[in-house]
Image (cartoon, grey):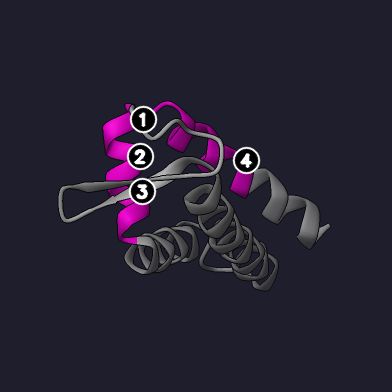
Amino acid sequence: MIIESGIIIFLGLLFLFIKLPRHWALLLLGWSLALDVVVSAVAYVIHWGTFSGVMAAAVAGLMCSGFTAVARWAIGYNRGGVIVPGAFTRSGT
């Protein structure tokens, strides 16, 4: 039940990320460690109070970290004004 709750929390965060404009998504992916820490901390704060809530937030944080690594590889990131293209993006966009 905890893993399923973590997956649901992660999906909610993923859908929020998908709704971001592309330039914001690339900028956030440029700061991947900060993104992972902030998202995990927010999930912990929201689900604080029960053991199952904290464990579900931990699962969501781990999944967010994995998604960040895959997203940086797949779509790229923006670091210091330089866009690094991913494996599934054209270098001209």
Q: Position of residue 15 (x, y in %)?
A: 53, 32
Which residue is depicted at the point 63% across and 59% down? 63
Q: Earlier in the sequence, mark 3 or mark 1?
A: 1
Q: Hey, which quadrant is residue 31 in on the image? A: bottom left
Q: Hey, which quadrant is residue 55 in on the image? A: bottom right
Q: Which mark is residue 25?
A: 2
Nearer to us of marks 4 and 1 is 1
The residue where tag 1 is placed is 20
- Disc 2 and disc 1 in contact, CB within 8 angstroms: yes
Amino acid type, mark 1: Leu
Amino acid type, mark 4: Leu
Q: Earlier in the sequence, mark 4 or mark 1?
A: 4
The stretch of residues the image draws in magenta is: 10-31
The residues tagged by marks 4 and 1 sit, at their Cα atoms, a distance apart of 15 Å
Q: Position of residue 77 (x, y in %)?
A: 36, 48
Figure check: 79 above or below 14: below
Mark 4, Cα crowd under 10 Å, few <14 / some 14-19 / many 20+, is some
